Image (tube, rainbow, N blue to C red):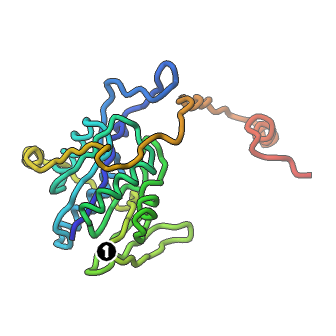
Amino acid sequence: MKILVPIKRVVDYNVKVRPLSDSSDVDLNNVKMAVNPFCEIALEEAVRLKESGQATEVVAVSVGKSDSQEQLRTALALGADRATLVETDSLLEPLAISKVLKNIVDDEKPDLIILGKQAIDGDNNQTGQMLAALLDYPQATNASEVKLESSFVEVTREIDGGLQTLKLNIPAIITTDLRLNEPRYASLPNIMKAKKKELNVIAVGDTGVDVSSRTETLSVELPPTREAGIMVETVDELMDKLKNEAKVIQWVY
């Protein structure tokens, strides 16, 4: 059984991002980059399935600039068997990425595709669903537990009312939630082995996908600074501030 895991290169979650001086985009100069945390969770689950003997191969794939090879090497060090980079200098939107991934899936023919539910730099939460629609595959989003059988996969996901368990025929698409997170770290021997593992690079133009942008970013700004709280003396003063300053309540007559 083959598992495909898409990987995205994002700003490290420990870094406080700032906009450029002209507010046109996020400032990425001299900023530490890393594997998107949700993609890392997806990779962890894929490697666990392989270690349990339920999967035979884990393939990592990324769509982005040549710098993304660094994150793919990290994926290889964490347990992926080989990797593919679809190289482009453009900033792709979820629909374009989904179409590129569809081409990869058509070539690789994996039994299971595990993605992070979203990327921390955009929070779109769209790629997994779009890819499932393009492939006409069953999907389970926000997975907190995955049980793989011979011809189907059982996925438990959290919903507002509790837990929901889905049974999907294979091939299928799963997007992972934080509940699946069991951190693993790349050891030095595995980092050295990763340098020798296969990493293919193909141009996005070779996929035949139209990756032109359909949206335009007007500006990127920091959120307003939160003001310090204050102490109030009476309930009436509290209610007055909630109504007139915070404007979160209305008087009921």
Q: Amino acid at mark 1?
A: Lys
**Disc 1 residue crowd, few under 14, some 14–19, many 20+, Cα 10 Å:** few
Q: Nearer the viewer, residue 190 or 21?
A: 21
Q: Nearer the viewer, residue 43 or 13?
A: 43
Q: Can you identify the residue that label 1 sits on?
A: 147
How many labels, in total?
A: 1
The spot of residue 157 in percent (x, y) is 44, 68
Picture coordinates of residue 209 (x, y %)? 38, 49
**Who's the residue at 37% across and 28% down the image?**
28
**Residue 161 vertical position relative to residue 237 in the rendered view, above or below:** below
Left/right of residue 18 with respect to residue 215 in the rendered view:
left
Q: Is residue 99 above or below residue 143?
A: above
Q: Nearer the viewer, residue 218 or 223?
A: 218
| Residue at x 16% of width, y 54% of height | 82
Residue 253, given in percent of the width and then of the height, sits at 92, 52
Based on the displayed image, in which of its 4 quarters is residue 138 positioned? bottom left
Q: Element type at marker 1?
A: strand
The quadrant holding residue 43 is bottom left
In the current view of this chain or complex, which residue is farthest to the bottom?
150
Q: Name which residue lies at 79% across and 42% down.
A: 239
Query: Which residue is more in the foreground, 146 or 59?
Result: 59
Residue 251 lies, in percent from the top left, at 86, 47
Question: Which quarter of the image is occupied by the N terminus?
Answer: bottom left
